[in-house]
Amino acid sequence: DIKGFAFDLDGVIADTARFHGEAWHQTADEVGTTWTPELAEGLKGISRMASLQMILDAGDHADDFSQADKEALAEKKNHHYQQLISTLTEDDILPGMKDLIQSAKAAGYTMSVASASKNAPMILDHLGLTKYFVGIVDPATLTKGKPDPEIFVRAAEVLHLNPENVIGLEDSAAGIVSINGAGETSLAIGNADVLSGADLNFESTSEVTLANIEAKMQ
Ligand code: G6P
Ligand code: MG
């Protein structure tokens, strides 16, 4: 039975996936990569440097950039992103997610955060949600990012739970693969065609209530 939840952050708890997209779109324009919906979707859940590499590869200019160039581009994107999220408040919690987190806590579930973002602790503070989580996996300590299972394996360890007792929540295809690889139950939020590998599918965060999750698990 389920005893805990491992939450992705961007696009699951916080309405920040669009800001990552906006900032990466500017990077793509700068390096001459055509920005497409498919590229935007594929970048979700992917670490900062791996995202940049995907953008360079998509533009076929990967060889034109030195390591120093790449670090400068990633730094510039992060600066832009941090400007976009500097005014985040509780109002930027996605619909229903505060209710879910509060009701899960009240019902005795434990929760951790499995985000690839180095900005996650700051965002959770802005949203006033830090106190609900027993821990946040530090992505700087991972050897591999999503879709590798490592981050969700670690998120279960933070909870002191076996993976089979954990539901992982994700809005990205890479994240669903990671949850499944970790042996947890995968709960996808978004387009079910894109997130077809998930155990449970929800169209939007507002449908992800504790009652709906428990009903689908039966
Ligand atoms: C999350 C987002 C990605 C982002 C990654 C790294 O997984 O979904 O879009 O690239 O975090 O975020 P960071 O804030 O460390 O650049
Ligand atoms: Mg996400």
Image: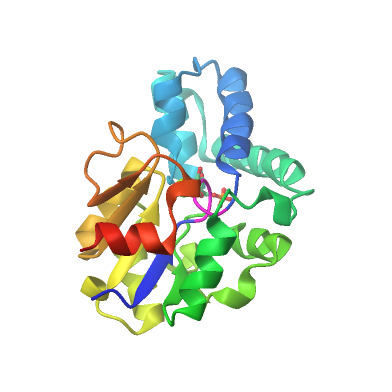
Above-or-below relation of 179 to 156:
above
Quadrant of the image for the C terminus? bottom left
User: Which quarter of the rendered picture does the N terminus lie within?
Assistant: bottom left
Q: Position of residue 11 (x, y in %)?
A: 51, 45
Task: Pinpoint residue 185: horizontal percent, then vertical percent.
Answer: 25, 61
Residue 186: x, y in percent?
A: 28, 56
Q: Quadrant of residue 141?
A: bottom left
Of residues 26 and 187, which is closer to you in this image?
A: 187
Q: Is residue 141 magenta?
A: no
The residue at the point 49 percent across, 44 percent down is 49
The one nearer the camera, 80 or 199, is 199
Left or right, 105 with respect to 215, comes to: right
In percent of the image, x 43 and y 82: which residue is there?
108
In the rendered view, would you say 107 is above or below 194? below
What main secondary structure does the magenta stretch of the protein show? loop
Residue shown at 26% from the left, 75% from the top? 165
Task: Give how far across and how far down residue 44 sits, in percent.
Answer: 44, 40
Q: Which residues are magenta?
A: 9-13
Question: Is 121 located above or below residue 180 in the figure?
Answer: below
